Image (cartoon, rainbow, N blue to C red):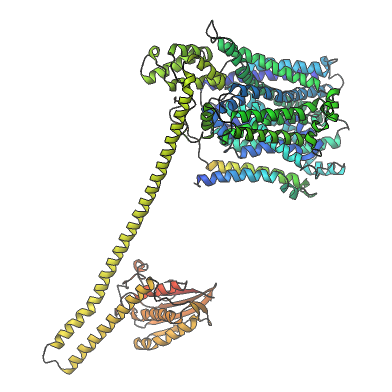
């Protein structure tokens, strides 16, 4: 049997293990840039710090109370990660190039490095996250109490200890652990590899534990999904509800989508701790997959718990109490550790993230403003100050969480507490999105929007969470402040009939966006804001963005080194200055700080203390920076103009290039056509020349007075006659072809009986066939087939094909086979012969002008244009003319025409 | 390799339509008192859409260009 003492000891041992893991993780990550700890898998697992004990315990409770509503918490982040290419990628790129340290730093940096905005964001984040930390304390406390209550004697040394004391112990332990864990040093980019390694490890533990419990409950106890669902239905527990998918479902999906971006700990892990932008590629699908695995057994566990646990059992603890009730101590311990993991990982990362914000944006600026110098004495002042302030912040944040827990300890569900935090941090979303995509979003707009949204949230959601413990709040809820019903927190401005969550989310985000947009439109941005807006919005236009280093003026290297050493530490400061000196080729002592170097230094400092503080710090050292702001603005404008000008130039030159390319193409085409024309002309001349030569020579013989007898004379004249006939035919064909090619001599395609045309052609050729003694085999013939064409032209094609079959057939017993059929909507005619056929190499050529089958052909009276013309005609009837495989040894021409 | 701009549009469509598939009114179509294999239809629907979104993202991401960091680290300016 598990006892409370035993699980507490296990928890302490587990924390010890985490510490060892973080320590070695840190050393390994520092030792090698390519270690496993820099892998996308570890990155994805660490993002799952999103799954806190709210997921581990609370989701089941939520599913038991409101059915499928629990899924919204995972669907929102799924959508955001599915679309990682758009928002997350931009955030990560900005975070990496601008050395962003927190979400407050991001917003402050975007809106003109304003420290006031950073303070506002930090305060809201601390207040907003307080309920969330309380939720974790509550979950751990409840889980220990659940173990303690599981059997007689399990209470052990917890006897007489109430929830409050237990929670205080847990909070104190957590604070100590987080301080040891997360504030051992101040890193360049606020990256904590050791912590990330430990968080990734915890992600594996909680997934394993939840899956183990899920499989055990579903298949071990419940007998499979089907049995659980049917038994629940039999017990009257319905997961169908028309109310599930209402405005609350939508609001929670939006909230969780906002939370995955805006929660300080998610921002810390996803953006600040990101060591390689390409890791997002994996996280984009792997993180939703992790969420899916985490929620696959939620519904079955909830249903099984509802049907089998005694009435009144806390559904939030089903994950732990079901194994306990089944007597599975080992599994119960695993479940406890899993829940503990999810709570600790959240507390660690959230308090590190918040402590960075508090120390960078609240404590540092106060110190900077109050002291004239930058820390005196031993030279490590700033670093130590940072560490101390972070430690105090962590203690403060956990104290606040504990206070909230003890004030609101009576409410029993986990999920509603978490939603309060989600709605609080969601107020950052409009400012973030506007900062990323809307150049004109101004500091005043963002600050007003966030502030108004926060006030509305605090009034409509945070305050009502104290309803059960404070009579004052309870009366306020019913009557409104000073009896003004118009301002009642859950019925603001008389808006009734909405779920309190939807009501609060609607008013806070609506007024937030409204103020952001309106104030931005009515105010003007300062010079620095405009620069930063450009840097953020155009982050993907590489090289086109002026970096935000606007401090100009003179400063000695000594002064700068003094500042750098105090923030970055001696080693890194020296390295930075030596690199710069090497680049400009001088001794470090003689380094003359260029504006670029000051800009780089500022970004390095910003990586440790935030953009606003770094800016203030350097402004103190660099003289003349005040005057140069306008100058820099001008520079930025000029740069912008140059960029636009060069883009225009680029565009124009691209157009020119494409025009030139088109011209070249056209030229090549013309040259080819010209070549074809030359070929054609020379072939025509050749074809014309042969008959002309014989006509001339015969007529010369006839002209000479001589002793030709009548028979000879007769033969010569008939030769001249034949040759001139051939010549006329050739010229006719050429004219016909060129007319066809140019689309002149067009005919109207009209329904024509192709079979009749074939019969007519056979009739016309009858004499020719007889003359050659050719046998005509008539193959299968179809009945009348109507095609779209011209009867005379079609007949011309058939005659041409038949006469070719006759002319080029040198077989001793010439045979021609004609068949026609209608197949799949086409009228097909095959005209085959048993001649020599067409050589393989010529098959493609025979449809060209003036090409004849060369190797045979006793009678070459044709000009070699017949097939070209035939093909042109058939093509104009939307058909094809080609060579087909033949049953006879010779060639087989096939005409295919679509039947209408 | 498919056109990068079309891939980006594909990502946008996947995210936008994925979001639409999870919220009313499209969910209403599947929110019926029907079970398949003993599991309520709406549960199957939500998890299948979820799984398809994951697969779709993995597929599109595979073809999207990787980020190439600039050559010289983060030199100044």
Place of residue A833 in the rendered image (x, y in percent of width and height, measured from the top left): 40, 78
Place of residue A776 in the rendered image (x, y in percent of width and height, measured from the top left): 42, 84
At 40% from the left and 14% from the top, the residue drawn is A588
Q: State whether residue A182 is above or below residue A505.
A: above
Q: State whether residue B51 is above or below residue A779.
A: above
The quarter in which the C terminus of chain A is drawn is bottom right
The quarter in which the N terminus of chain A is drawn is top right
Residue extending farthest to the bottom is: A710
Residue A522 visible to an observer of this rendering:
yes
Residue A87, image quadrant: top right
Residue A185, image quadrant: top right
Q: Is residue A359 left or right of residue A621?
A: right
At 40% from the left and 88% from the top, the residue drawn is A766
Residue extending farthest to the front is: A522
Which residue is nearer to you in this view: B24 or A140?
B24
Residue extending farthest to the right is: A311
Q: State whether residue A485 is above or below residue A344.
A: below
Residue A219 visible to an observer of this rendering:
no
Place of residue B11 in the rendered image (x, y in percent of width and height, measured from the top left): 58, 43
Which residue is nearer to you in this view: A431 or A575?
A431
Place of residue A839 in the rendered image (x, y in percent of width and height, measured from the top left): 35, 69
Residue extending farthest to the top is: A377
How many badges with numbers are in the image?
Answer: 0
Q: Is residue B72 left or right of residue A391?
A: left
């Amino acid at each position: 049997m598990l006892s409370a003492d035993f699980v507490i000891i296990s928890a302490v041992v587990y924390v010890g293990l985490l510490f060892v893991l973080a320590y070695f993780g840190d050393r390994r990550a520092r030792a090698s840039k390519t270690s496993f700890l820099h892998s996308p898998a570890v990155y994805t697992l660490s993002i799952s710090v999103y799954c806190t004990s709210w997921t581990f315990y609370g989701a089941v409770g939520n599913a038991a109370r409101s059915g499928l509503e629990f899924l919204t918490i995972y669907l929102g982040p799924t959508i955001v990660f599915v679309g990682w290419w758009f928002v997350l990628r931009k955030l990560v790129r900005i975070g990496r190039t601008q050395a962003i340290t927190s979400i407050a730093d991001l917003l402050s940096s975007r809106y003109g490095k304003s420290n006031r905005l950073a303070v506002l964001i930090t305060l809201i984040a601390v207040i907003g996250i307080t309920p969330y930390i309380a939720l974790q304390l509550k979950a751990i406390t409840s889980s220990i109490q659940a173990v303690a209550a599981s059997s007689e004697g399990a209470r052990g040394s917890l006897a007489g200890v109430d929830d409050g004391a237990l929670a205080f112990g847990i909070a104190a332990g957590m604070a100590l652990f987080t301080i040891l864990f997360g504030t051992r040093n101040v890193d360049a980019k606020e990256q904590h590899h050791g912590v990330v390694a430990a968080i990734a490890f915890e992600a594996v533990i909680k997934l394993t534990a939840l899956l183990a419990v899920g499989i055990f409950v579903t298949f071990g106890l419940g007998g499979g999904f089907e049995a659980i669902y049917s038994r629940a239905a039999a017990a009257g527990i319905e997961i169908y509800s028309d109310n599930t998918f209402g405005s609350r479902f939508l609001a929670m999906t939006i909230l969780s989508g906002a939370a995955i971006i805006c929660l300080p700990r998610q921002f810390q892990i996803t953006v600040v701790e990101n060591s390689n932008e390409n890791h997002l590629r994996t996280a984009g699908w792997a993180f939703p997959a992790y969420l899916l695995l985490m929620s696959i057994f939620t519904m079955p566990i909830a249903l099984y718990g509802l049907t089998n646990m005694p009435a009144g059992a806390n559904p939030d603890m089903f994950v732990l109490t079901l194994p306990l009730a089944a007597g599975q101590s080992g599994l119960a311990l695993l479940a406890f550790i899993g829940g503990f993991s999810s709570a600790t990982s959240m507390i660690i990362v959230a308090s590190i993230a918040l402590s960075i914000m508090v120390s960078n944006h609240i404590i540092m600026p106060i110190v900077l403003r109050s002291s004239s110098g930058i820390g005196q004495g031993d030279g490590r002042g700033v670093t130590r100050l940072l560490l101390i302030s972070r430690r105090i912040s962590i203690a403060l944040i956990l104290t606040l969480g504990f206070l909230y827990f003890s004030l609101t300890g009576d409410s029993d569900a986990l999920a509603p507490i978490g939603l309060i935090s989600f709605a609080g941090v969601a107020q950052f979303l409009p400012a973030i999105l506007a900062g990323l995509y809307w150049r004109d979003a101004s500091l005043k707009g963002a600050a007003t929007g966030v502030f108004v949204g926060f006030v509305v949230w605090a009034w409509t959601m945070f305050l009502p969470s104290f309803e059960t413990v404070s009579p004052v709040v309870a009366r306020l809820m019913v009557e409104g402040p000073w009896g003004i019903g118009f301002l009642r927190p859950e019925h603001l401005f008389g808006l009734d009939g909405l779920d309190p969550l939807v009501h609060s989310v609607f008013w806070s985000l609506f007024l937030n966006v409204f103020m952001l947009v309106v104030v931005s439109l009515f105010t003007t941005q300062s010079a620095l804001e405009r620069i930063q807006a450009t840097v953020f919005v155009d982050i993907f236009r590489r090289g086109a963005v002026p970096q935000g280093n606007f401090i100009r003026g003179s400063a000695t290297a000594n002064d700068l080194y003094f500042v750098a050493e105090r923030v970055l530490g001696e080693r890194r400061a020296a390295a930075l200055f030596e690199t710069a000196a090497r680049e400009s080729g001088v001794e470090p002592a003689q380094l003359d700080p260029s504006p670029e170097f000051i800009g780089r230094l500022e970004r390095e400092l910003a990586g440790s203390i935030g953009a606003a503080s770094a800016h203030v710090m350097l402004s103190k050292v660099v003289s003349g920076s005040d005057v140069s702001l306008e100058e820099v603005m001008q520079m930025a404008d000029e740069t912008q103009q140059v960029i636009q000008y060069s883009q225009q130039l680029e565009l124009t030159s691209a157009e020119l290039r494409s025009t030139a390319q088109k011209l070249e193409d056209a030229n090549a085409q013309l040259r080819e056509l010209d070549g074809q024309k030359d070929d054609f002309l020379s072939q025509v001349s050749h074809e014309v020349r042969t008959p002309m030569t014989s006509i001339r020579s015969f007529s010369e013989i006839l002209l000479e007075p001589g002793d030709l007898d009548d028979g000879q004379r007769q033969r010569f004249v008939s030769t001249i006659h034949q040759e001139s006939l051939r010549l006329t035919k050739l010229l006719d064909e050429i004219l016909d072809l060129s007319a066809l090619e140019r689309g002149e001599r067009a005919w109207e395609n009209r329904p024509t009986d192709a079979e009749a045309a074939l019969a007519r052609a056979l009739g016309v050729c009858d004499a020719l066939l007889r003359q050659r003694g050719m046998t005509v085999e008539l193959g299968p013939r179809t009945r009348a087939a109507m095609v779209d064409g011209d009867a005379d032209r079609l007949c011309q094609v058939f005659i041409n094909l038949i006469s070719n079959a006759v002319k080029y057939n040198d077989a001793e017993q010439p045979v021609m086979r004609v068949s026609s059929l209608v197949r799949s909507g086409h009228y097909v005619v095959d005209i085959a012969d048993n001649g020599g056929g067409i050589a393989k190499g010529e098959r493609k050529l025979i449809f060209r002008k003036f090409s004849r089958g060369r190797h045979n052909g006793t009678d070459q009276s044709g000009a070699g244009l017949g097939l070209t013309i035939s093909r042109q005609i058939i093509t104009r009837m939307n058909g094809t003319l080609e060579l087909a495989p033949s049953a006879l040894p010779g060639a087989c021409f096939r005409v295919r025409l679509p039947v209408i | 390799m498919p056109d990068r701009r079309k891939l980006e549009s594909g990502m946008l469509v996947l995210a936008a339509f994925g979001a639409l598939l999870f919220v009313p009114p499209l969910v209403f179509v599947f929110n019926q008192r029907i079970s398949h294999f003993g599991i309520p239809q709406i549960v199957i629907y939500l998890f299948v859409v979820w799984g398809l979104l994951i697969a779709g993202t993995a597929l599109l991401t595979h073809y999207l260009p990787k980020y190439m960091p600039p050559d010289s680290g983060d030199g100044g300016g």
